[in-house]
Amino acid sequence: MKTFVIPVLAVFTALVLGALLILATGGDPLLAYRGLWEGSFGRPSSISETLVWATPYIFAGLAVALAFKAGLFNIGAEGQLSVGALASAWVGFAVTGVPWPLHLLLALGAGMLAGALWAGIAGLLKARTGAHEVITTIMLNYIALLGSGYLLSGLLKDPNPLVALAQTPKILESARLPPILSDLRLHWGFVLALVLALGVWWLLYKCTLGFEIRTVGLNLSAARYAGIGVGRTIIVAMALSGALAGLAGTVEVVGLNYYHTPGFSVGYGFDSIAVALLGRSHPLGVVPSAILFGALRAGASRMQFVSQIPIDVISIIQALVLIFVAADEIVRWIYRLPHPRTQSGPDAPEATAPELAVARGWGRGE
């Protein structure tokens, strides 16, 4: 549990600084945070919206966290999310005559496969040429987003003349995830996200493949010495990461919107980096981290309505959380926490995969 002390204190510190910012702009912090609470957890409908927002954050956060465990920075979750949503939407409206739930499973599988293939490109380039995955995944983001926009404005555009926006036709009923409760928007994709969080934890900590992924992330030389295929593990880790990110876009299509359109993502892929860092790159830590980000998103409008402060304050709080988690020395200094290097024994925390990946340096192709 000591691993999560820094994230908890980071969130608390960000909220305190956010309150000071609200106060400095002439607002009432108590009123603002009351609105935030009412909009995120204050009513059953608010809880539903929080979990709806949290669902893609869980999938995308798991994607980034899994890559982190392999010492990889998957900055391409936004693009993988987009191609996953596009593939599932196409299967959802173009494939006909298939009953539920088989059609739904085909749509989910298409989204996962598209995300895996898209991320696998960066993994292959990393393993074969040493191309840094940060650069390749960022470039693949542009290709995915702009390519999706082109297809949605042409080949895959809804032929209905009453639809002016660039979007796919609505998917068939047989490809949709049902809501958990008929009067709320929360759907079974959230339950699927929780199941996959447990699945990723089991993969990383109970399976041989997970051990290989973590070994490659911790020490490449030791992994090679142990006979682990480093290149293969990198490709597999990136593909699995992309599959999870693709699923983040897929559940938005099959569980919520029922079609795909440019700009449907409000930065899930990029926010997922913060979600994974706040969760300390642990699959089970990603879940509460994603729920926090979902709560901030869901409660932002109510906070603005109640307190009349700019909604951008939420983005500032998210940025502060990320700063304090990434630069945990600040949190340790504020709260006089001991540095992990001064601790020893079985309770001493180990370095996270992102920290070790940074230590390797850029562009060495390891």
Image (cartoon, helix red, strand yellow):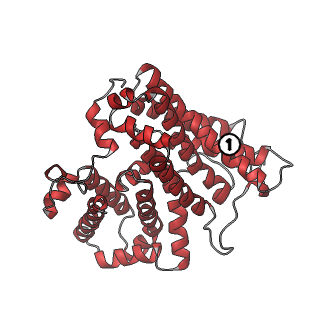
Which quadrant holds residue 111? top right
Q: Give left or right: position of 142 versus 19.
A: right
Q: Quadrant of the C terminus?
A: top left
Residue type, mark 1 in image? Ala
Secondary structure state at the residue bearing disc 1? helix
Q: Quadrant of the N terminus?
A: bottom left
Q: Position of residue 268 (x, y in %)?
A: 48, 51
Give the total number of marks visible in the rendering. 1
Q: Is residue 278 left or right of residue 191?
A: left
Residue 40, image x and y in percent?
46, 72
- Considering every residue shown, the one lying at the far top of the view is 129
Considering only vertical position in the picture, is 140 above or below 340? above
What residue is drawn where x is 57% and y is 62%? 190
Mark 1 surroundings: few (<14), some (14-19) or many (≥20) residues within 10 A: many
> Residue 28: in sight, yes or no?
no
| Residue 48 seen in the figure | yes
Position of residue 306 measured from the top left corner of the image (x, y, whole percent): 40, 77
Q: Is residue 325 left or right of residue 54?
A: left
Q: Residue at x 22, y 53 (%)?
A: 328
**17 sits to left or right of 44:** left
Give the residue at x 29% y 36%. Answer: 358
* Residue depicted at 33% across the width and 25% down the height: 363
Frontmost residue, 229 versus 13: 229
Given residues 144 and 54, the one toward you in this image is 54
Instruction: Kindly identify which residue carries mark 1.
Output: 110
